Amino acid sequence: MVTLDGVRTGSAGHPWFGDHRLAPAAPSDTIRHMLRHELRDTGWPYQRVLPAAPMAIPRASYAEVFRASAALLDLLRRTALETAPTTEGRLAAYRMPATENRLWVADPFVEERYADSVVRPDLVIGPTGPRIVEFNVSAALSGVLETYARLEVWRHLHADGQGRTPYSSPDPFAVRADMFRALCAELGTAPRVAVVGSARVHGVESRYFQVEVEHFNSHGLTARFFEPEELVEAWDCAPHLRYPVGLRNFTIPDWLDAGLDTSPVQDALDNGCLLVGTQTSTFLHSKLTMGLLSEGRPWMTTAERALVDRYLPWTRILADRGTTRDGRDVDLLPYVVKNRDLLVLKAGLGESGKQVVIGRDVDQAAWESAVDAAADGSSIVQEFVAPQTCRVALIADDSDEPYEAEVAPVLGPLLFGGRPAGLFCRFYGDGSAGIVSVRAGISSSDNCMVAV
């Protein structure tokens, strides 16, 4: 029986995080070296502050995150698809940029069915518990390799002689491999997986893709990493050598910024290579869909409405119109202007904290200017969720010993094919809160959360 040896208890900030804290299982230099070694040559940014142990939360809290995320994802998908009966109609309804009108699968059912194959909501623990502040719906989301790498280190350090650890967590790569096995079985194809991306995108190196490819190849799948110009080799070959499915590990904006041509991807799609998640994921990824869901849809049940109210902060598409707030009718624009300290402004397709204005972080003039510029229906306004803290063990470059600090983490539950695949989290080692991006500077860090 696995016990909680090496686990300390005590105050851990908000009660949702629980009282268990895993103690460091090796000297600081050993942990530091192992963490950096696992993410070497991937493009992951240097971090001055690193975790000293996995972040442990109660099993019930861990389960709640995935239960709520999966249920809300189902509602999010339905909300996005109901905006119009066709892709063309949705493009118009969302006013999508022309650059996003590409890379569609010919069969619209297949296009819609596999849009939500890879998802990572972002959530914070507010005063009342978990609140999902956005949904990242794309196979190019960060957190997968990073969670896998952190878990590999913690497994080596915390497992007993029989390989058992005093905590549990899914393996992201194992769950994604299972997703592809199920997909191939559903399509009646050979289990051959193309991982499509590019090491020419800023901040990414080829090993970022190769680690997952190697994992797939050693666990019963045949996999290969393809740069765009190599993708013809995935379908223009003998039938038994083709790759019928794949992972679309890139975004259109990133490739366009890097000067990469997306037409080889369209050729692969047109010749029978299904890459997930499909382009329809863009509609689910748009924050406008959260606004629609938060406002309520006619088909929602009372229980679904209650679920949304519990786990989504109040969110509205910003425009000159009426809406409701706390059960009363309000004119949206005047309400937003007057309540800067309570709100956050986000662009519909902003990435990595870009195009986000936190009202309490700017003065009134700047807020009004931002609201005025965004009030055309392409952005959302959202209730600010005050992030709660937990206590964690950290290792800093300028310290030989681990130390404890209060941090306000942003949680990123990974869902592949609807299944839990690990819990990524980001935080600032100096204890500050706000928009947390791992590329925001040397005070940002990441870890994985595990269940005890």
Image (cartoon, rainbow, N blue to C red):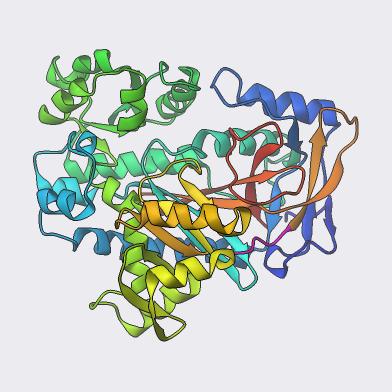
- Residue 388 sits inside the magenta stretch: yes
Could you tell me which quadrant the N terminus lies in?
bottom right
- For residue 79, above or below residue 48: below
- Residue 80 sits inside the magenta stretch: no
Horizontal and vertical percent for residue 41?
Answer: 57, 17
Horizontal and vertical percent for residue 80?
Answer: 25, 59
* 270 relative to 161 in the view: left or right: left
Along the viewing direction, whichever of 379 and 143 lies nearer the viewer: 379
- For residue 334, above or below residue 134: below
Residue at x 20%, y 18% (from the top left corner)? 241
Residue at x 67%, y 38% (from the top left corner)? 445
Of all residues, the one furthest to the front in this rendering is: 365
Horizontal and vertical percent for residue 179?
Answer: 35, 44
* 284 relative to 88 in the view: left or right: right
Along the viewing direction, whichever of 2 and 269 lies nearer the viewer: 269
Along the viewing direction, whichever of 334 and 279 lies nearer the viewer: 334
When asked about the image quadrant of residue 446, the answer is: top right
- For residue 61, above or below residue 299: above
Residue at x 70%, y 44% (from the top left corner)? 428
Residue 217 visible somewhere in the drawing: yes
Specify start and end residues of the magenta stretch as a single range: 385-389
Of all residues, the one furthest to the right in this rendering is: 400
Residue at x 49%, y 61% (from the top left corner)? 132
When asked about the image quadrant of residue 200, the answer is: top left
- For residue 317, above or below residue 418: below
Magenta span main SS: loop
Horizontal and vertical percent for residue 375?
Answer: 35, 58
Q: How many marks?
A: 0
Could you tell me which quadrant the C terminus lies in?
bottom right
Residue 223 visible somewhere in the drawing: no
